Image (tube, rainbow, N blue to C red):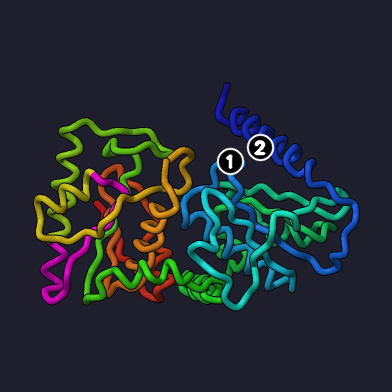
Amino acid sequence: MNKKWIKKISLFRKQLLLLMYYGRKINFFSDKDKGRIVICFDGLFSHGGLVDRLKGIISFYEIAKSLDYDFYISFTHPFQLSHFLYPNKVNWDIKEKELKYNPFNTKVIYLMDNFEANPLQLIKNSTAKTFFVYSNIDYLGTIYTKNTESENQQIWHTNYNELFAVSNELNKEIQKLPHDNRIVFHTRFTSLMGDFKDTTHTVLDENKKQELVNKLIRKMKEVVVLHPTKKVYVLSDSNIFLNFVKQKTSFSILEGSPKHIGMKNNNADLESNYKTFTDFYFMAKSDTLYLLKLDKMYNSGFSKYAAIVGNNKVIVLQE
């Protein structure tokens, strides 16, 4: 069976799952005259990591603003988003009992990993009033084709701050972080180091792992000399790499074990998920941010969007 048919079957199964799920929420009465968009992260299937989810949120918030629709976020899996981020200028919180499906004026839009869609046109062309959306894509470039990348990044930055304020609990954890002048190196290995499962499956043999680690250390040392007065931090999704950095270099790391919230059964409790958010804000508030992408390493958006939130930029180092 070719990839095209596998993709079609997978999409059909997910659409059937959504139909069964919302079929239990049918309500033929609706007092909603104004359009509304609800973006959902409910664990029905993998929604991606934190930044993937934020991409979908920011994109559909922008669409809601452009259409003068109400906007809500139903983020309940694997934790309640409000543990970490509160509504700021927009009251996006919505309760489970409010997620009612009216077959005459409600539409479910599934756009996970769909880079070809134009979500603004999909909603404009629909007669529905309520939209339950599943998306993990940054669609600002699709919505505003004439904008420069920096213009869309400024929209992203503005939208993020309109939507979110840091919770008191998360703020306490952020305040525990170092506040020195610093540069930060970020690495995203996914499964390459073999210390956890991810959406990718390639694991390097021991020799290849060591070669990659040595290349990364050399690359970082080349950059560090450009910042003689700054402290150097390394953040990563790999504990194996972080332990090597701690033992073999003078660079600093942040305590805690990184977890990927998009992976099912990652055994991360609520406290463990603070690490994802504190890493994100630590990057956002750094003086200079570097993404290391060598060989088969993943081109992570985590550091890119942290830089956007912090209103600075990330420098990609690759070969």
- In the rendered image, which quarter is residue 121 located in? bottom right
Closer mark to the observer between disc 2 and disc 1 = 1
Q: Position of residue 43 (x, y in %)?
A: 58, 44
Q: Is residue 207 above or below residue 38?
A: above
Residue 137 tag number: none
- In the rendered image, which quarter is residue 6 located in? top right
Query: Are there few (<14), some (14-19), or many (20+) residues within 10 Å of tag 1?
Result: some
Q: Position of residue 147 (x, y in %)?
A: 55, 72
Count of all numbered marks drawn on residues in the image: 2
Whether pointer 2 and pointer 1 mark residues with C-beta atoms closer than 8 Å, the reply is: yes
User: Which of marks 1 and 2 precedes in the sequence?
Assistant: 2
Give the residues in magenta: 222-239
Q: Is residue 280 left or right of residue 243?
A: right
Viewer-nearest residue: 142 or 53: 53
Residue at the location (90% across, 51% down)?
28
Q: Secondary structure at mark 2?
A: helix
Residue named by callout 2? 14
At label 2, the amino acid type is: Lys
Q: Secondary structure at mark 1?
A: loop
Query: Are there few (<14), some (14-19), or many (20+) residues within 10 Å of tag 2?
Result: some
Residue 68 within the segment the image draws in magenta: no
Residue 45 tag number: 1
Q: Is residue 176 above or below residue 260?
A: below
Q: Position of residue 177 (x, y in %)?
A: 28, 68
Q: Of all residues shown, which one is farthest toward the top?
A: 1
Q: Is residue 193 left or right of residue 119?
A: left
- Looking at the rendered image, the quarter that the N terminus falls into is top right
